[in-house]
Image (spheres, grey):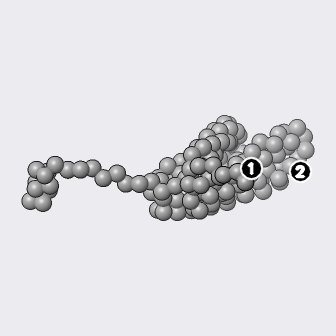
Amino acid sequence: MPARSDVTHRTTLSGWVFRAVISAHMAAIVAQPVFAGVYLSGDYGSLRWHAVGADIVTSIGYLQVVVAIVVWVRLRQAWPFLATLALVAAETVQYFAGLNGALWLHIPLGVMTVAALVVQFIAAWRRPVQRLKRVRTMRKPEQREVDNA
């Protein structure tokens, strides 16, 4: 039986949940340009698929924010929350730009959000998502006396 890799072994449960949510988010967001392309090629019924996909992507994005908060609290890693917050903010602007027909903003922002999520997906799967250890520094005796005074 092969041994588990070091990355698999060290990733915590909340790290795996974060990876699962980001993977679902990735699958949903990759379908959006496909639905938009089918619509632009003349199948006007696929606009409904694009709208449903936007609702799904946005919902998974908000779920990812919640999971990223858990990762931050439990594992002391802030980057998943900060990256997710920026991504979800851009997705929200893009969502409303699409509803209002502002394609000049909707399309380029869509490309940027897909690219940002791909980068975040790679970062989440590249290294183990584990609790960060606090590093304690040794203080000189003179500093301890000054701090205690």
Quadrant in which the C terminus appears: bottom left
Task: Give the mark nearer the N terminus: 1 vs 2.
Answer: 1
- Residue 56: percent from the left, percent from the top? 73, 57
Is residue 3 found left or right of 43 in the rendered image?
left
Q: Secondary structure at mark 1?
A: helix
Identity of the residue drawn at 10% across and 54% down: 146
- Residue 15: percent from the left, percent from the top? 58, 57
Identity of the residue drawn at 63% across and 49% down: 5
Identity of the residue drawn at 79% across and 50% down: 50
Is residue 12 found left or right of 4 in the rendered image?
left
Q: Secondary structure at mark 2?
A: loop
Determine crowd level at label 1: few under 14, some 14-19, many 20+ residues with C-alpha closer than 10 A.
few
Viewer-side residue, 62 vs 81: 81
**What amino acid is labelled 1 in the image?**
Ala
Residue 116 visible (yes or no): no
Is residue 144 found left or right of 54 in the rendered image?
left
Q: Quadrant of residue 114?
A: top right
**What amino acid is labelled 2 in the image?**
Gly
Q: CA distance from mark 1 to mark 2?
A: 21 Å
Viewer-side residue, 128 vs 149: 128
* Pair 1/2: label in front: 1
The residue beneath circle 2 is 45
Identity of the residue drawn at 83% across and 54% down: 48
Determine crowd level at label 2: few under 14, some 14-19, many 20+ residues with C-alpha closer than 10 A.
few
> Do the numbered discs 1 and 2 sit on residues whose CB atoms are within 8 Å?
no
The residue beneath circle 1 is 27
Viewer-side residue, 4 vs 123: 4
- Residue 46: percent from the left, percent from the top? 86, 49
Residue 142 visible (yes or no): yes
Viewer-side residue, 51 vs 112: 112
Quadrant in which the N terminus appears: bottom right
